[in-house]
Amino acid sequence: MSMSPPLRSVDEFMSAQAELLDGITILDRSCPICGSSNSSTKASRFSLGQWPIKECHRCTMVYITRAPDQAALIEDYDWNKSTKLEDQWRDSSRPVIETLHRRLRWRSKILRRPSLAQRLAETVRSGPVIDVGCGDGAELATLPRTFTAIGIEISASSADRAKQKLAGRPVEILTNSALEGLKSLESNSCSGAVLRSYLEHEADPRAVVEELGRVLIEGGVALVKVPNFASLNRVVMGKKWCGFRHPDHLNYFTPNTLRLIGRVGGFDARFKFFDALPTDDNVVVTYINTKRPHQVYELLGTGSQNDTSPTYI
């Protein structure tokens, strides 16, 4: 079987990625939380090729300023190929780090924690629950069979695998973007949700969180897991941090920005001790739905939605 040539340089990686993205429109993005354009903000050293990363001058959200058109991703973009391409480049460009990373994966098996779906089942006793970005259904497969559930997945091939894996369970799989999938659900129709390794991929995470607040009942719980931009490992590893994936990871959250986007959607954010360790590459936030959404400019104290004066430097 032939092996793909190694991707040792940024140019080689970007060329292979451009071929994968051929025909897909690339759109410019403002800050996904407060909407600031950050046009005069300098791109950070974590940028790569055509994917600038900036930190918002108003709310400190870190994000890629360009994104593939989400509407084209349902059929035209193969997430598996994108992930394999990134992994291939990492293996070629930093073999020592990637080899060490793989050898240490045994820790996650020994120290394995309950899945987000299992944790949700311990908190939410009844009512339908949602898995936003359910992939092939692996997370929902850990949910007790007594729960009815809805999975939302933008990739048609992944959604088909989820349907096969969860056949016979009280689970409905919606093949759609997260936002459109949530919009199709009635208000106050679900009691809980999991978003595992999803929100970092979403081009409009604020709209998704706001829509989630509408769909969940008051007191409903959402468990969200994303890469932790505030982790010590990110500080130490810099551009080689495992959380950087251009452009698959569009948003780079910290506990502070997770708290902010949650409040905009009407959620109180809570962090259990082991869910937000600075030594962990990931962070888990527990959102409790208060049904009291806030205007982002009120939270930032800028007085006007159009006020672009900096709040954080």
Image: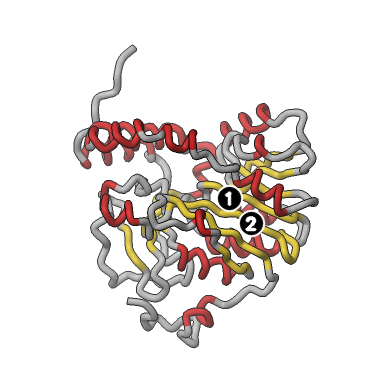
**Residue placed most toward the observer, 169 or 237:** 237
In the picture shown, does residue 192 fall above or below 10?
below
Horizontal arrangement in the rendering, residue 33 relative to residue 215 (left or right): left
Instruction: Name the quadrant containing residue 36.
Output: bottom left
Residue 234, numbered circle: none
Q: Measured from the top left, where is residue 219 in percent x and y?
A: 72, 64
Answer whether labels 1 and 2 touch (C-beta < 8 Å).
Answer: yes
Look at 48% across and 84% down and name the residue there. 301
Work out how far the residue at label 1 is from the one at label 2, CA to CA, in angstroms: 7 Å
Q: Is residue 220 left or right of residue 24?
A: right
Question: Which image quadrant for residue 43?
Answer: bottom left
Q: Residues within 10 Å of mark 2 (few under 14, many from 20)?
A: many
Q: Residue at x 53, y 37 (%)?
A: 75
267 lies left or right of 243 = right
Quadrant of the rendered image containing residue 174: top right
- Residue 90 lies, with reference to residue 238, above or below; the image says above
Tag shown at residue 222: 2
Which quadrant: the C terminus?
A: bottom left
Q: Nearer the viewer, residue 174 or 277?
A: 277
Q: Residues within 10 Å of mark 1 (few under 14, many from 20)?
A: many
Q: Earlier in the sequence, mark 1 or mark 2?
A: 1
Label 2 element class: strand
Marker disc for residue 195: 1
Q: Amino acid at mark 2?
A: Ala
Q: Is residue 219 visible?
A: yes
SS under mark 1: strand
Query: Residue type at mark 1?
Result: Leu
Q: Position of residue 298 (x, y in %)?
A: 53, 82
Q: How many marks?
A: 2
Please report the residue visible at 38 percent of the width from the left and 40 percent of the height from the top: 21
Q: Residue at horizontal 59%, vertical 42%?
A: 115
